[in-house]
Image: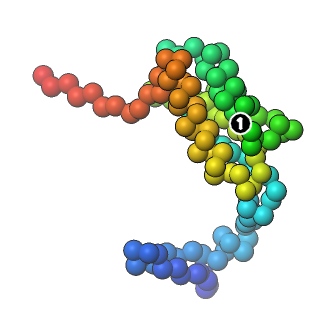
């Protein structure tokens, strides 16, 4: 039995082998060819955060961005109770050409507004106890 594959060279001179079966049998979606695209952000806040206030701030930031499409539903919900954070999914729709500018704008604005409200965005920490 022959397995056909495609070999690619990366910038650091490594060879990546991609079996053709996965490519020819699967579906490839070119998101940049569609007129609109959904941004998928995950924003983690501390367990002591007021979740209703957090959700309101996230909604206000996203809804007020001029390039977020107003005729598409925005999803903002708790998606995970993680090890050190409560994670919200934030999913607005934008024109494909606006994807990255809005993505970057939203991350910055969310951080600024959560900071103003005193809502902590935790980061992974390791505590070492020595006896």
Q: Residue at x 61, y 83 (%)?
A: 4
Residue furthest bottom in the image: 2
Q: Where is residue 103 in the image (x, y as percent from the top left)?
A: 63, 45
Residue furthest left in the image: 131
Quadrant that contains the C terminus: top left
Q: In which quarter of the image is residue 126?
A: top left
Q: Residues within 10 Å of mark 1 (few under 14, many from 20)?
A: some
Quadrant that contains the N terminus: bottom right
Q: Which residue is drawn at 65% across and 15% down?
A: 52
Above or below 108: residue 101 = below
Q: Position of residue 47 (x, y in %)?
A: 50, 18
Q: Position of residue 78 (x, y in %)?
A: 64, 26
For numbered disc 1, what is the local secondary structure?
loop
Q: In which quarter of the image is residue 96?
A: bottom right
Q: Where is residue 89 in the image (x, y as percent from the top left)?
A: 64, 34
Q: Residue at x 62, y 16 (%)?
A: 53
Q: Residue at x 72, y 74 (%)?
A: 24
Say left or right for 126 vs 123. Answer: left
Visible in this render: residue 47?
A: no
Q: 63 and 28: which one is in front? A: 63
Residue on which the image places disc 1: 65
Say left or right for 28 vs 126. Answer: right
The number of discs equals 1
Say left or right for 4 vs 111. Answer: right
Residue furthest front in the image: 66
Q: In which quarter of the image is residue 40?
A: top right
């Amino acid at each position: 039995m022959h397995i056909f594959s495609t070999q690619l060279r990366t910038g650091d001179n490594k060879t990546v082998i991609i079996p053709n079966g996965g490519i020819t049998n699967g579906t490839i979606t070119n998101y940049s060819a569609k007129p609109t695209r959904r941004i998928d952000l995950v924003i983690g806040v501390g367990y002591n955060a007021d979740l209703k206030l957090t959700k309101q701030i996230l909604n206000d930031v996203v809804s007020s961005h001029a390039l977020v499409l107003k005729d598409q539903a925005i999803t903002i919900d708790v998606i995970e109770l993680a090890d050190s954070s409560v994670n919200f999914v934030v999913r607005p729709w934008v024109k494909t050409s606006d994807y990255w500018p809005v993505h970057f704008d939203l991350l910055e604005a969310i951080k600024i507004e959560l900071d103003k409200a005193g809502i902590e965005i935790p980061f992974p920490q390791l505590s070492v106890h020595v006896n």
